[in-house]
Image (spheres, grey):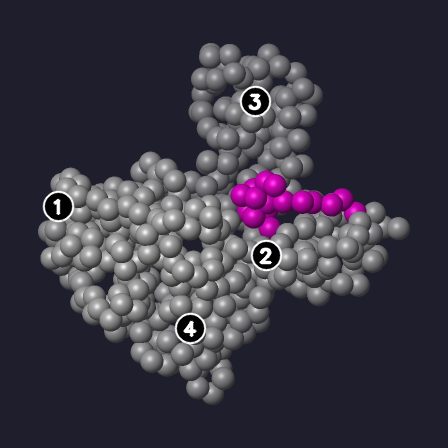
Amino acid sequence: MYAILDIETTGGKYNEEGITEIAIYKYDGHEIVDQFISLINPEREIQPFVVNLTGINGNMLRNAPKFYEVAKRIVEITEECILVAHNAQFDYRILCTEFRRLGFDYERKSLCTVELSKDLIPNQPSYSLGKLVRSLGIPVTDRHRASGDALATVKLFKMLLDKDTNKSIIQNSVRLNPKHQLEPRHIDIIAELPAITGVYYIHKEDGEIIYIGKSKNIKKRINQHFTGTNAKSKKIQAKVTAVTYEATGSELVALLKESEEIKRVKPIYNRALRRSIFTHALYSFEDENNYINLKIDVADGRKKSITTFSNRQSGKNFITKAVEDYSLCQKLTGLYKTKTSCFNYEIKTCEGACIQKESPDLYNNRVNTLIAKNSYDNKNMVIIDKGRDIDERSAILIENGVFKGIGFFNLNYQINNLNILESIITPMQNNRDTQHIIQSYLRKNKRLKIVELTNS
C-alpha cells in the first residue's frame, strides 16, 4: 500500500518551514482507496515568493486547522504505507519536522518518483514534476497546489509501476529514514544557504571548486546534491566542505554566469564541459523558385544558424508552431516531404507556396518576420529581467548582435542609451553557448522586456 503525497510549505530557513497544505492519496497499486486533503495554519509567516507560486496566503489559512489537529489523520492514512512523493526527501523531512515539534517520532518507508523516473524513463530533458508529466502526456491541474501535484504524482507513479516489469527497481528504491542520508556537516552547509536564484560553487577542503551549478532555489538544489544517490552526487557528498554562491535574481543571468564560470574554472564534476549544450539548429536557404526554406539540422559551427535547440525534438516543436503562427508551408519547412502540395494546402491553411501559387515576396515576408523575431543579428538591445532585490533589475546587453555582458541597475535608472549602459555592464564572453542560452530563454519567456538601444 502506498501513501502518495504532496506538501506545500511556508518557505524560509531550513527545518523552520511550516506546512500550509497537504494532500495524501492512499493507493493500492491499482486505485485510490482513501484520501486526505487540507489547508493547514502553519502559525508562521509565508514567504512572498511562495504566495506567488502557490496562491496560498495568510488570509486563506486563518481558520484552517493547525497541524496538531490533523496529525492523527495523517498517521492513520499513512499507517503501514510506503510514502511516495516527487522529491520524497523534502516531503518526508517536512512531515518529520512537524511531528517532532509535537514530540512524536514519525517513521515510514519512502519512495522518490524523481529517482524512479530517472531509472525507468531515462533521457528526459527535465525531471521537475510539471515538465516531466507534460512530456509524458499526463494531465495536471492546480499546479503547485498539494492536491493537483499529488494527483499528478499518482498518475506518474502508476506509469512507473507499469514500466518496472520485474519490480526490482521499486523494491530496491524503498528506503527507511531518508532523513539519515544527510550528514551533520551537510545539514550545517544547507542551513547557511538561501532559497534564491543564482550560481553556486561547491568546494573541497583546500578551497578548490569541484562543481558549479545554477538554480532558482540554491538551498533546495544543494539539498538534492546531498541526498542524491548517483555516482556524481556521492563523490560530491564525500568531498564537499563548503558551498559559496552568487545571487543573480534572473535565471537568464544565472545560466550565462554558470556557462562562463564552468569554462573558466573547469570543475572536475561538471560533465557539461565535454559536450555542447545544444545539438540542432535552424537554418535557411533560398530554393530555385526564390522561396526561403527553413530546416532543422544538426548544429554545424561552419554554417550560420538562425537559432539553436537542445535536441532535435525541441527544434521540431519550434518549427511546427512556427508553421501555425506564421502560416508557413509544411513542405518549405521540412515537415512534409512531397513533390506536390503540402497537407496544409489541402485543408486551406497554407497559401500555396509549395506549388508556387503564393508569390515568393509575400511568403518570404512572413519567413523573415519569424527569422527577425528569433535572431538578434545586428541588433542593439538590452534584455531586462529580475534583479537581486525588489527595486533592482538585471540587464543583458546585445551590441551589433553580439552578447557583451550583464549588469544590474536600480528601477529609477533609465536604460535606453548604449553609451550609458556600457558603463554598468560587466563584460562576458560571446560564444555559441551564450547565443543558445539567450535565444532559448527568449523563446520560453515571451513577456520579457526588451529595449532597443540608440548610440547617442
Question: Can residue 30 be seen from the camera position used here?
Answer: yes
Residue 250: mark in rendering? 2
Residue type pointed to by label 3: Ser
Name the front one of labels 4 and 3. Answer: 4
Q: Which residues are magenta?
A: 438-453
Q: Is residue 427 left or right of residue 136?
A: right
**Residue at image mark 1:** 28
Q: Secondary structure at mark 4?
A: helix
Q: Is residue 442 left or right of residue 455?
A: left
Q: Secondary structure at mark 1?
A: loop
Sequence-wise, which precedes: disc 3 or disc 1? Answer: 1
* Picture residue at 64% right of the left edge, 57% below the top: 390
Question: Which residue is outermost to the front?
Answer: 63
Is 4 in the magenta? no
Q: CA distance from mark 2 to mark 3?
A: 34 Å
**Residue at image mark 4:** 190
Residue type pointed to by label 1: Asp
Q: Secondary structure at mark 3?
A: loop
Question: Which residue is outermost to the bottom?
Answer: 206
Residue 334 location (% of width, % of height): 49, 30
Q: Is residue 422 left or right of residue 145?
A: right
Sequence-wise, which precedes: disc 2 or disc 3? Answer: 2
